Amino acid sequence: MIKKQDLRYFQENQILVASIDIGTNSTHLLVAEINLELKSFSIKFTDKSTTRLGERDEEGNLTEESIQRALVTLKRFKEYCKSNGVKQIVTAATSAVREAPNGQDFIRRVLDETDIQIEMISGSEEARLIYLGVLSGMAFEDQSFVIIDIGGGSTELILADKKDAIALTSSRIGAVRLKNDFLNKDSINSERFIFLTTFIKGSLEPSVRKIKSRSKGDKPLSMIATSGTATSLGNLISDDLGESKQKLHGYKFKKENLQNVLEKLIKLPISEIKKIPSLSERRAEIIIPGALILNTAMEMLNFNELTISERALREGLVVDWMLRKGIIKNELNIQSNIRKTTIVHQARKFGVESTRAEKVIDIAFQIYDQTKNIFYNENDPKAKELLWAASNLYNCGKYVNVGSYHKHSWYLIKNCELLGYSEAETNIIASIARYHRKTLPKKRHESWQSLISKEDKTLVLEMSLILRLAASLDQRPDKVISSVQIKLEGNILKFELLPLNRNNDLLLEKWNLRLCRNVIKELKNLDLKVI
């Protein structure tokens, strides 16, 4: 619960909280804006610095050089937080610090020089926080997931569903550790590859055994990968497949895609890997060991596909702080309204008028409920939910410019953070908004090309038509239509508009609705009659 001394944090509806992840390779800062009304948060700022705490001396201690790098970074992070009104900083130090004999000395030095209190967390606690971070950014629905986080010094494997973390494990193998111990040469031959794979299997075996023993056969099981190794490999795979990526949250790739990229990387000297545009110099040095760990884990757990989450430990620290302060009650509360909350967040962010959006949604749902076998063939809860999301955000492009705002809406929706929605679903929502007015899709449109399947394109055509009709009736600030009645008589689609006030003739609404005639004729070969 929120204590009396914490009330100073909550005088405003929104507060800023920072989390700092002190890892083996890098130290990361995340600043989150917590909305107390929605009981959720959005990411306002991120930064990182390569501090390389995993570089130890002969006794295993953190070196003075790495400590100095970390201190410089933490002082800079503290100054940023102080200058930007951050109310609270939460931190976590992971394997590099917890395994070093002088880890506690490092924590004391940081406190003395920066006034930042570092919490040194265990491997299982690190896994729990990663789970909370992923939970805050993805809809688990009725599935169970294996979450893998490959860090510099450790790899966490978590079995979880939306209610609880069923198994939390941590193995002392990571991309930096594997590189330092075994990969100082430029290339890997087949014998070396077999040795490394065997070593990784041995290191992961206890975690894999625990995951398998606690998984339930009655629930579908999928894999989620988080953090730097996963996102870097996602970029490399999308480049290898010739795909255009703006963001990686929700991006899926198959094991064969990973293996193809790994085979190419192994053949390259490190000097060539460092030239790959999507890799930083430090990430280039550890991408092969990271890929080896991920590929081996997928094989051991029998996964042929995974989904990337860009949320992990840093976001988990924020969620954990919200839980401890009583802002949210439990893990299930994070999941219960994740899709609704993220849509409301983005609508507010882009200045969408909520009352007008609610009017459009009401009319859109009335049209949806009455046009089965006219505009679409089967009731699909997913289609209605995506229509709801698009109806909330379809005019967010006015935040950029009123002219051609539907195109701006597509770009903003496609590139904003829609938590709980897959990449494919985000593209569908953006495209429904894109085609709710003006021209129908053309093959050359980037928005149309971003839709993967024929089914997705059909869904966009059907739901954008419904949104087009609903949006055409939103001509005044106040609600003037009580309901719409739709009937199909032969080849004529009759729309009857019932006003709230009998004295209102709805001239604006009828005129705008008639502008949809040509689209209905082209898509459904029906004639529109407005009553």
Image (tube, rainbow, N blue to C red):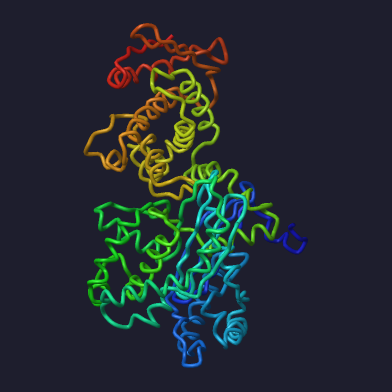
Q: Position of residue 195 (x, y in %)?
A: 35, 76
Residue shown at the point (53%, 50%) measured from the top left: 144
- What is the tally of numbered marks visible in this picture? 0
The quarter of the picture where residue 427 lies is: top left
Name which residue lies at 36% across and 69% down: 292
Q: Is the residue 116 above or below the residue 57 in the image?
A: above
Of all residues, the one furthest to the top in this rendering is 490
Tell me which residue sits at (59%, 51%) in the image: 40
Above or below, 381 against 309 in this view is above
Left or right of 55 in this view: 40: right
| Residue furthest right in the image | 4
Place of residue 363 in the rendered image (x, y in percent of width and height, measured from the top left): 50, 23
Front-lying residue, 382 or 47: 382
Instruction: Name above or below for residue 316 compared with residue 77.
Output: above
**How far across and how far down the image is residue 259, in percent?**
30, 61
Quarter of the image holding residue 159?
A: bottom right
- Quarter location, residue 283: bottom left
- Where is residue 321 shown, x and y percent of the image? 64, 62
Position of 511 with respect to 239 (left or right) is right
Quadrant containing the N terminus in the rendered view: bottom right
Q: Residue furthest bottom?
A: 58
Q: Is residue 333 left or right of residue 429?
A: right
Give the quarter of the figure containing the C terminus: top left
Position of residue 507 relative to residue 235, above or below, is above
Q: Nearer the viewer, residue 471 or 261?
A: 261
Q: Nearer the viewer, residue 483 or 167?
A: 167
